[in-house]
Image: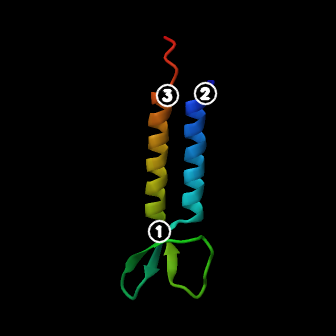
Amino acid sequence: MKMNKKQLFVVWAGIIAIVLMGIFPPMMVQLESSKAFRGYDFIVPNVRSLTVIDFTRLLTQWIIVLALMTGLLITFQNKSD
C-alpha cells in the first residue's frame, strides 16, 4: 500500500504526538488515601516525590490519537475506483 502525502503527514503527526505524550505523561500524586491528577510533566523519575504516571489516562490518549489517525488515513485514501 502506497501512501499519499496527506496520509504520510497524518502518520508522522500521530507518531510525534504519541512520542510527546510519552515524554510528558499525565501524572498523579499519591495522597494518604487517594490519588489526585497533577498535570503533565517530563518523564524523569523522582524518588523523593509521590508522583506516579497515570497509565490509564496515557493509554486513553494514545487510543484516541490512533483512532483519529485511522479515520484520517481512511479519509485521505486515494479514490481510484
Q: Residue at x 62, y 77 (%)?
A: 45
Q: Which of the 4 quarters of the picture holds residue 34?
A: bottom left
Q: Are marks 3 and 1 in contact (CB under 8 Å)?
A: no
Crowding at mark 1 (Cα within 10 Å: few <14, some 14-19, many 20+): some
Residue 3: mark in rendering: 2
Residue identified by numbered label 3:
76
Crowding at mark 2 (Cα within 10 Å: few <14, some 14-19, many 20+): few
The residue mark sitting in front, 3 or 1, is 3
Q: How many marks?
A: 3
User: Considering the numbered disc 2 on the image, is that residue within a helix, a strand or a loop?
Assistant: loop
Relative horizontal placement of residue 44, taking residue 58 as reference (left or right):
right
Label 1 is placed on what type of residue?
A: Asp
User: Considering the numbered disc 1 on the image, is that residue within a helix, a strand or a loop?
Assistant: loop
Whether residue 18 is situated above or below residue 54 in the rendered picture: above
Q: Residue at x 54, y 85 (%)?
A: 49
User: Considering the numbered disc 3 on the image, is that residue within a helix, a strand or a loop?
Assistant: loop
Residue identified by numbered label 1:
54
Of the two numbered discs 2 and 1 on the same chain, state the one appearing first in sequence. 2
- Where residue 25 appears, as percent x and y from the top left, is 53, 65
How far apart are the two marked residues, 3 and 1, measured between alpha carbons? 33 Å
Q: Residue at x 56, y 65 (%)?
A: 24
Q: Which of the 4 quarters of the picture holds residue 19?
A: bottom right
Q: Are marks 3 and 2 in contact (CB under 8 Å)?
A: no
Residue 19 vs residue 55, the one in the foreground: 19
Residue 29: mark in rendering: none
How far apart are the two marked residues, 2 and 1, measured between alpha carbons? 34 Å
- Where residue 54 appears, as percent x and y from the top left, is 47, 68
How far apart are the two marked residues, 3 and 2, measured between alpha carbons? 9 Å
